[in-house]
Amino acid sequence: MNKRVMMLAVGLVALLGICQAALAQQFSADFVTTVGDRSLSMKANVDHSNVRIDTANGAILISGVMANVNYMIVPATKQFKAIDRNKLPLLLVYQLKGETSREHVAAETIEGIETRKYKVTVKTPDGKDQEVYQWVVYNSDKDINPIKLAAVDGSFVMEYKNIKVGPQPKELFDVPSDYQDMAAPSAPAPERK
């Protein structure tokens, strides 16, 4: 698999942010990232603290907040790789990495869902300030899940589209038992509980 494509896929699951308290806890949607005039759409499934992304190149990314680990699965080769979630830059979570300020801008409806729109300033690793808008679903006056993030200057947008609320099959979030670990080809898939 192309290393650049693999890093893009890993980065996108980090951008997804491992939704800790998702819309109605369970949904499927298209996860769309747009940079300039280019868009990339992937399928997302969320079940409580588990997230699965089916990428355009055939890889599958699975993340479990409670397990604190991500898996990249490559069905074409029946392999998987564990990726430590703490080492990834999480950008699409309520509290953004490097956040220095947050201002409520408006209430807006996205995909038929009431959200709060915030203007957030984050300090980038090179010390510069970057401003983004973040749309967050709330429940009983508590912010629970971002569903859209966009640069104030319009240079990028990440968002869920075509949201379908409902239960997700448990097996979507498991590494198949006959898959081999990329780091240790003879190691079996992790036992999931």
Image (spheres, grey):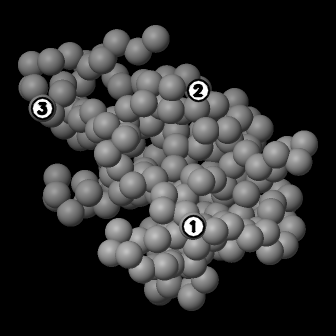
Q: Which residue is mark 1?
A: 100
Q: Of callouts 1 and 2, which one flags the residue occurring earlier in the amino acid sequence?
A: 1
Q: Nearer the viewer, residue 69 or 3?
A: 69
Left or right of residue 129, residue 190 in this image: left
Residue located at (57% from left, 78% from top): 131
- Disc 3 marks which amino acid? Ala
Q: Of callouts 3 and 2, which one flags the residue occurring earlier in the amino acid sequence?
A: 2
Residue located at (58% from left, 26% from top): 169
- Disc 1 marks which amino acid? Thr
Of tags 3 and 1, the one toward the viewer is 1
Of tags 1 and 2, the one toward the viewer is 1
SS of the residue under disc 3: loop
Label 3 to label 2: alpha-carbon separation: 28 Å
**Residue 181's mark?**
none
Q: Is residue 150 visible?
A: no
SS of the residue under disc 1: strand
Q: Is residue 176 visible?
A: yes
User: Where's residue 150, x and y in %?
Assistant: 59, 74
User: Where's residue 28, x and y in %?
Assistant: 63, 44
Label 3 to label 1: alpha-carbon separation: 38 Å
Up-down relation of residue 30 to residue 87 (above or below):
below
Which corner quadrant of the image does residue 68 belong to?
Answer: top left
Q: Which residue is mark 3?
A: 183
